[in-house]
Amino acid sequence: MNRLGTIGIVIIFVFVLVAIFAPWIATHDVGATNLSVRYLGPSAGHWFGTDSTGRDIFSRVVFGARISLEVGIIVVTVSAFVGTLIGAVAGYYGGMIDRFLSGYLFNVFLAFPGLLLAIALVAFLGAGLNKLIFALCIIGWVGYARLIRAQVLKVREYDFVQAARALGAGDFRILFVHILPNAIQPLIVQASLGMAGAVLSEASLSFLGLGVPPPAPSWGVMIEEARDLSTLQAAPHALIFPGLAIALTVLAFNFVGDGLREYLDPRQRRR
């Protein structure tokens, strides 16, 4: 893997450790308020300063990593699983099944901008972490389905697949033993990039008040609470540190995705 991909892996590993050991890394109770120290700048007592109610920003950023990574992992896992099954069936069987799935079902979901559809779903279902994850899964599976369908359409014509069919192998064995293992590589790259998109979507919806409800320590909620002009002038750190956490996480997953794309493609690796 290239240098940027390695850097991305290191950053993600650090965030994963922070999320796992958040109770021991956080220096303060994330919900404890103290109006006497509101908008305090970074100091020895509060490494990232405090917010509008005197809560410790460092501790909230640390626990925010848990929410962002939880959303990313669940959304990517569920979306990739559902998308892989639907895309594989569409690409393998073709005909009316493919025409219905790829020609109608895929296009219905792709007709709406993903984030706008997620906003509509969350607004209908109500705010909450589980409902946010459900909405992101609803809009996320289509990209994986289209990718796997294209790969299956290509791999199903290979000689070893035709040989397995000639030897009497059933559709289930051909699809899941012979085709999917040879079509899954692009899905790995798509999943790493999908993690970045899920983290960014969670922060965006939380910022709009449609994601994790406050006072949960979500990075998007923290930015929303610090977005007014008076806060930016009096305490820019309340916006900077959660913003940097989002930027680093998204950048790290994009680095890993680009690195995996280069590593898994022999032509790019030779270059």
Image (cartoon, rainbow, N blue to C red):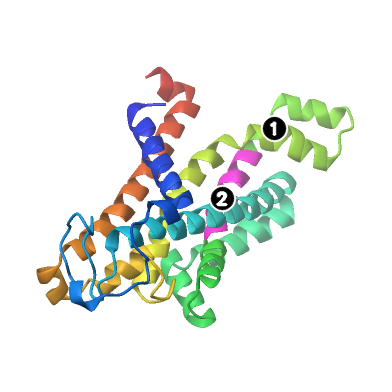
102 vs 27, nearest the viewer: 27
84 w.r.t. 100: above or below: above
Q: Residue at x 48, y 77 (%)?
A: 127
Looking at the magenta stretch, what is its main secondary structure?
A: helix
5 vs 68, nearest the viewer: 68
Work out whether mark 2 precedes mark 1 in sequence or the reverse, and give the earlier one.
2
Quadrant of the rendered image containing residue 40? bottom left
Question: Given the image, on which type of amino acid does mark 1 rest?
Answer: Glu
Quadrant of the rendered image containing residue 208? bottom left
Furthest-right residue in this view: 168
179 w.r.t. 27: above or below: above
As for residue 238 lying within the magenta part, the answer is no
Residue that carries the numbered disc 1 in the rendered image: 157
- Label placed on residue 135: none
Q: Residue at x 56, y 50 (%)?
A: 144
Q: Residue at x 27, y 74 (%)?
A: 225
117 w.r.t. 189: above or below: below
Question: From this viewpoint, is residue 156 visible?
Answer: no
Dot 2: what SS? helix
As for residue 148 lying within the magenta part, the answer is yes
User: Looking at the image, do the residues carrying marks 2 and 1 touch, with CB atoms under 8 Å apart?
Assistant: no
46 w.r.t. 128: above or below: above
Residue 162 lies, in percent from the top left, at 78, 29
Q: Which residues are magenta?
A: 140-152
